[in-house]
């Protein structure tokens, strides 16, 4: 099936439809996902197609959504939860971090919890507070969870189905500012869920991005090319586990690494990447690993968010610094 | 100044008090609010209560000897747990807290497996599907939502309402009086009510959440809270094994038939400190505890069994012999609980080990094999 020029929302919708068709144990649950189709319409039409027992409008309570999903998984189901916005995941923190992530380990492998938690995340949409956050490190730092994020309609379509099919709990982060970006989607067999991808090859520096910063990184690489610099863009796709092979191979060639993410700088995902890169490619680095990120503040009011977010200019500035070592 | 809460129902008329069949003196009476099950195996109820009390006593002893790091005692709550557990069908699923040793026993778990969590040899200890008894949950209230989700699965599996007793299934989830205040418990009530789920919430109101008396949690009885959510709440004498059995049986039958959730409050008392690490003398007078010891759940059934002539001295002697065997089994079993190998913690974190974790494991195994320890060896 070929799906030319569809949005990420539509790609996710198609992916979830396929997941529901492929396995009768799959069910979707969340606030407003049924009749309304979700506040971003990701589940539009699915309740009508699959019924209210498989596309469940839940009570308003995030711990309830994840806790009940765990119970359903204990009974052999594959629940896909939608948490409405990034800033509303914290009421479910106990269920995600202390229950979902740990039960397999606690049970010595007797329990399998194939639960997916979808979270629209990131900023850049002019929203009010709690609607623009990047909570990925809380989950990437939690053993027992997988954390993945898509950056294109094709990846959204493939990765959501792979996440549903995975037997471990998956935090599935959807970059909401690219929800309406369009792209061609096909049914070709996808790369493994945990594999990073070189989205744009280059030779002078490696620019590592994921989710919402991937299109920004590609735009920066375009500008840099006009200035005679060849930037390789790596889309991590999976934060946990982290595909260090792809990162290492790229940095080994270019000798320079930059990381761009929306989440705050300190203790962020870039710190983990910088540590691993210097540990594994120490002798091949021409410059320190540089990070282009949000600042160590709460997410700002939307009128000033575009300067707060790591944009093309800040990435290019960092590239200059890297090249000048 | 906050308004003075209404006085509790302790001095209320009997018809307002907790449902009770067996008085502390051992007399069997009827209660207009609930019938007794047609078939009752009173000797078996007594036997199980006596054995779980011994299990508990032995575990406390093992803790004192340094074999366990900690033990949460169930003393005083034997009737609540054994009564509730005797109402279960084989296919029902149980979600316990950390104190349900008596339910675990009735579910057929090897009691030695309960010790591992407290000895530090495991974070779980048993396969939750084998006896349909989930892992202990230490985070207060978290398991109530797991029970709700499991019950949602039962609905989708058409496992309720067929009228076939060997097929229709319910969920029995245990919680304490302290857990009533957790947001997650209240979410579980909302979900169970709105979807009319086959789940029975069995709250052992043992009056205490560590040092907090029930008045810290609420000014109305536990059972009364159910009505605000829209399902029945039942208050039973938690030291009367028959009341606990009858109420749980009634609620489970309703759940299995599609009649929805129930909250049972078993009014009982935590006779020992919260755990072996706690000192109850710091927050409650021994005299109150003594009053509750006088309402001992085992003693009243023993009195009844003796007075009714249902059993003879040999019955009690037989139980004593089994208690000794159980204690032996616990002592040897505890000491021979296998210490997990260094790889175990890495093995079940994911269904397949990520490459990075594999590297960490390899390094860790090398470290362990080198004979180094966490002390200075060089
Ligand atoms: C979420 C959470 N908060 C605090 C604790 C610490 N804690 C352990 S037991 C307990 C009291 C629980 O009381 P209750 O629910 O009445 O159960 P009981 O111990 O009486 O069986 C507390 C506060 C915990 N385990 N989980
Ligand atoms: Mg209590």
Image (cartoon, grey):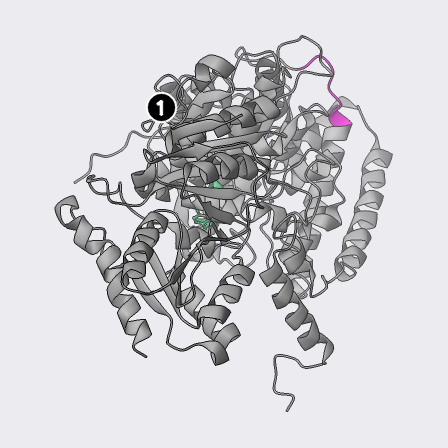
The answer to whether one can see residue A167 in this image is: yes
- Which part of the image, by quadrant, shows the N terminus of chain B? top left
- Residue picked out by circle 1: A32
Circle 1 — which element?
loop
Picture mark count: 1
Dominant secondary structure of the residues highlighted in magenta in the image: loop
Residue at 29 percent across and 29 percent down: it is B6
| Circle 1 residues within 10 Å: few <14, some 14–19, many ≥20 | many
Q: Residue furthest top?
A: B163
Residue B322 at what x, y percent from top left?
Answer: 83, 43
Above-or-below relation of B45 to A166: above
In the rendered structure, the residue with mark 1 lies on which chain? A
The reply, left or right, for residue A223 in relation to residue B57 is left
Above-or-below relation of B273 to A46: below
The reply, left or right, for residue B39 in relation to residue B358 is right
- Is residue A314 on the magenta stretch? no
Q: For residue A200, which quarter of the picture?
A: bottom left
Residue A276 at what x, y percent from top left?
Answer: 48, 69
Residue B71 at what x, y percent from top left?
Answer: 60, 54
The answer to whether one can see residue B222 in this image is: no
- Is residue B40 on the magenta stretch? yes
Question: Which residue is nearer to you in this view: B130 or A23?
Answer: A23
Above-or-below relation of B41 to B49: above
Q: Which residues are magenta?
A: B37-43
Residue B360 at what x, y percent from top left?
Answer: 61, 67
């Amino acid at each position: 099936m070929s799906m030319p020029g569809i949005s990420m929302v539509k790609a996710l919708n198609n992916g979830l439809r396929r997941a529901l068709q492929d396995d009768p144990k799959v069910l979707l649950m969340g606030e407003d996902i049924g009749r309304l189709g979700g506040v971003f319409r990701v589940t539009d039409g699915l309740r009508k197609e699959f019924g209210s027992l498989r596309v469940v409008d839940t009570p308003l309570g995030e711990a309830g959504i994840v806790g009940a999903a765990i119970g359903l998984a204990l009974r052999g189901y594959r629940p896909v939860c939608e948490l409405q916005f990034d800033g509303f995941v914290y009421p479910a923190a106990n269920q995600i971090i202390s229950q979902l992530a740990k039960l397999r380990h606690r049970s010595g492998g007797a329990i399998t919890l194939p639960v997916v938690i979808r979270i629209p995340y990131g900023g850049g949409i002019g929203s009010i507070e709690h609607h623009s956050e990047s909570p990925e490190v809380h989950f990437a730092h939690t053993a027992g969870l997988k954390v993945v994020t898509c950056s294109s309609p094709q990846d959204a379509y493939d990765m959501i189905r792979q996440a549903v099919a995975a037997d471990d709990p998956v935090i599935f982060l959807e970059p909401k500012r690219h929800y309406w970006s369009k792209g061609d989607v096909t049914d070709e067999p996808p790369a493994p869920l945990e594999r990073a991808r070189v989205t744009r090859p280059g030779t002078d520096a490696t620019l590592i991005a994921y989710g919402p910063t991937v299109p920004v990184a590609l735009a920066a690489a375009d500008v840099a090319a006009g200035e005679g610099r060849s930037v390789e863009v790596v889309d991590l796709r999976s934060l946990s586990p982290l595909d260090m092979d792809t990162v290492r191979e790229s940095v080994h060639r270019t000798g320079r690494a930059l990381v761009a993410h929306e989440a705050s700088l300190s203790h962020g995902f870039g710190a983990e990447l910088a540590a691993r890169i210097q540990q594994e490619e120490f002798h091949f680095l021409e410059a320190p690993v540089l990070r282009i990120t949000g600042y160590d503040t709460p997410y700002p009011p939307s009128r000033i968010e575009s300067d707060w977010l790591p944009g093309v200019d800040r990435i290019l500035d960092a590239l200059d610094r890297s090249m000048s070592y | 100044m906050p308004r003075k809460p209404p006085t509790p129902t302790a001095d209320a008329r009997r018809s307002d008090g907790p449902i009770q069949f067996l008085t502390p003196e051992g007399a069997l009476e009827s209660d207009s609010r609930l019938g007794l099950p047609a078939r009752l195996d009173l000797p078996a109820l007594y036997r199980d209560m006596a054995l779980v009390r011994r299990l508990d006593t032995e575990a406390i002893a093992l803790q004192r000897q340094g074999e366990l790091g900690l033990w949460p005692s169930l003393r005083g709550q034997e009737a609540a747990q054994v009564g509730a557990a005797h109402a279960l069908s084989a296919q029902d699923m149980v979600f316990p807290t950390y104190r349900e040793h008596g339910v675990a026993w009735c579910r057929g778990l090897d009691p030695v497996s309960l010790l591992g969590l407290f000895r530090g040899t495991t974070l779980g200890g048993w396969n939750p599907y084998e006896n349909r008894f989930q892992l202990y949950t230490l985070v207060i209230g978290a398991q109530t939502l797991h029970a709700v989700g499991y019950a949602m699965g039962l609905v989708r599996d058409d496992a309720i309402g067929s009228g076939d007793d060997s097929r229709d299934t319910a969920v029995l989830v245990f919680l304490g009086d302290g857990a009533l205040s957790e947001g997650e418990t209240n979410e579980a009530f909302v979900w169970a009510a709105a979807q009319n789920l086959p789940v029975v919430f069995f709250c052992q109101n043992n009056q205490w959440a560590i040092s907090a008396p029930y008045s810290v949690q609420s000014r109305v009885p536990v059972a009364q809270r159910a009505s605000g959510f829209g399902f029945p709440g039942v208050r039973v004498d938690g030291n009367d094994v028959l009341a606990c059995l009858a109420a749980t049986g009634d609620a489970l039958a309703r759940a299995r038939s599609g009649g929805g959730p129930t909250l049972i409050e078993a009014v009982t008392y935590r006779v020992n400190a919260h755990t072996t690490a706690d000192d109850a003398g710091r927050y409650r007078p021994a005299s109150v505890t003594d009053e509750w010891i006088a309402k001992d759940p085992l003693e009243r059934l023993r009195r009844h069994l003796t007075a009714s002539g249902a059993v003879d001295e040999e019955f009690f002697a037989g139980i004593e012999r089994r208690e000794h065997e159980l204690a032996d089994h616990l002592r040897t079993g505890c000491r021979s609980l296998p210490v997990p190998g260094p790889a175990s913690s890495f093995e079940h974190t994911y269904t397949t080990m990520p490459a990075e974790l594999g590297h960490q494991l390899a390094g860790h195994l090398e470290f362990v094999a080198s004979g180094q320890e966490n002390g200075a060896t060089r």
